[in-house]
Image (tube, rainbow, N blue to C red):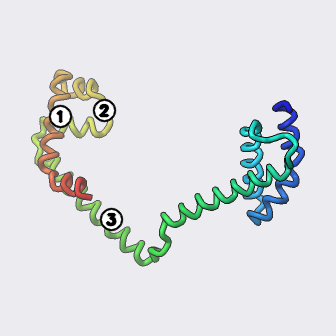
């Protein structure tokens, strides 16, 4: 039997496969997916089919095994996601307020750290942070390109030292 003949035989059984899939899934869309997976596997492994055996039965076995494997995968995925720890809307509100206040504190600390930087370092750093390119900063401040890069690097190092408490929290989390 050629591959073409085999594909035609698979297609001729698509309606009975769909009816059989509905017995498993009880949902038309899921049944269509199961039929598609079954037909794909049958076509991919057509060389495993032994001529003279029940072709429809062979397709149904592929379908049953595919359904069982998919069911096991989804059951395993559901056990990984616990749904016991539902978050109520009151907890969501508290969490959002807490995150906003923590965020405000962090932004305030970053602003304080920037204010502690000498202006020769803070101005190029802020411009770079705002999206300016090195050469644009150099042109605007009328300083060499290498000086801009050095000042931005020094500003980063100074900010790291000033904000080291946040770095420790990030590594411990």
Q: Which residue is mark 3?
A: 99
Query: In what quadrant of the picture does the C terminus appear?
Result: bottom left
**Residue 12: where, in percent of width, then height?**
89, 45
Q: Nearer the viewer, mark 2 or mark 3?
A: 3
Instruction: Locate residue 3: give its quadrant.
Output: top right
As rendered, which of 162 and 81 lies closer to the eye? 81
Q: Which of marks 2 and 1 precedes in the sequence?
A: 2
Q: Which of marks 3 and 2 precedes in the sequence?
A: 3
**Residue 69: where, in percent of width, then height?**
64, 56
Residue at mark 2 to residue at mark 3: CA–CA distance = 30 Å
Query: In what quadrant of the picture does the N terminus appear?
Result: top right
- Residue at 86% across / 49% down in the picture? 54
Label 1 SS: helix
Label 3 Cα neighbours within 10 Å, binned few <14 / some 14-19 / many ≥20: few
As rendered, which of 64 and 76 lies closer to the eye? 64
Is 91 situated left or right of 41 in this image? left
Label 2 SS: loop
Is 50 situated left or right of 156 in this image? right
Label 3 SS: helix
Q: Which residue is mark 2?
A: 132
Q: Which residue is mark 1?
A: 153
Residue at mark 1 to residue at mark 3: CA–CA distance = 30 Å
Label 2 Cα neighbours within 10 Å, binned few <14 / some 14-19 / many ≥20: some
**Residue 23: where, in percent of width, then height?**
79, 64
- Residue at 84% across / 37% down in the picture? 6
Label 1 Cα neighbours within 10 Å, binned few <14 / some 14-19 / many ≥20: some
- Residue at 26% across / 27% down in the picture? 134
As rendered, which of 119 and 157 lies closer to the eye? 157
Residue at mark 1 to residue at mark 2: CA–CA distance = 15 Å
**Residue 170: where, in percent of width, then height?**
25, 54
**Looking at the image, is 164 positioned above or below residue 91?**
above
């Amino acid at each position: 039997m050629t591959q073409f003949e085999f594909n035609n035989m698979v297609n001729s059984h698509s309606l009975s496969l769909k009816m059989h899939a509905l017995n498993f899934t009880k949902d038309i869309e899921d049944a269509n997916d199961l039929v598609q997976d079954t037909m794909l596997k049958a076509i991919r492994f057509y060389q495993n089919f032994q001529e003279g055996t029940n072709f429809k039965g062979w397709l149904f076995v592929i379908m049953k095994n595919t359904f069982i494997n998919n069911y096991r995968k989804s059951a395993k995925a559901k056990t990984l996601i616990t749904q016991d720890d539902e978050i109520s809307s009151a907890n969501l509100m508290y969490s959002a307020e807490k995150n906003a206040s923590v965020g405000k504190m962090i932004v305030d600390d970053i602003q304080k750290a920037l204010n502690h930087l000498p202006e020769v370092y803070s101005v190029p750093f802020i411009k770079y942070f705002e999206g300016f390119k090195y050469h644009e900063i150099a042109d605007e401040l009328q300083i060499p390109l290498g000086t801009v890069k050095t000042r931005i690097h020094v500003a980063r190092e100074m900010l790291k030292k000033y904000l080291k408490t946040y770095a420790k929290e990030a590594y411990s989390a």
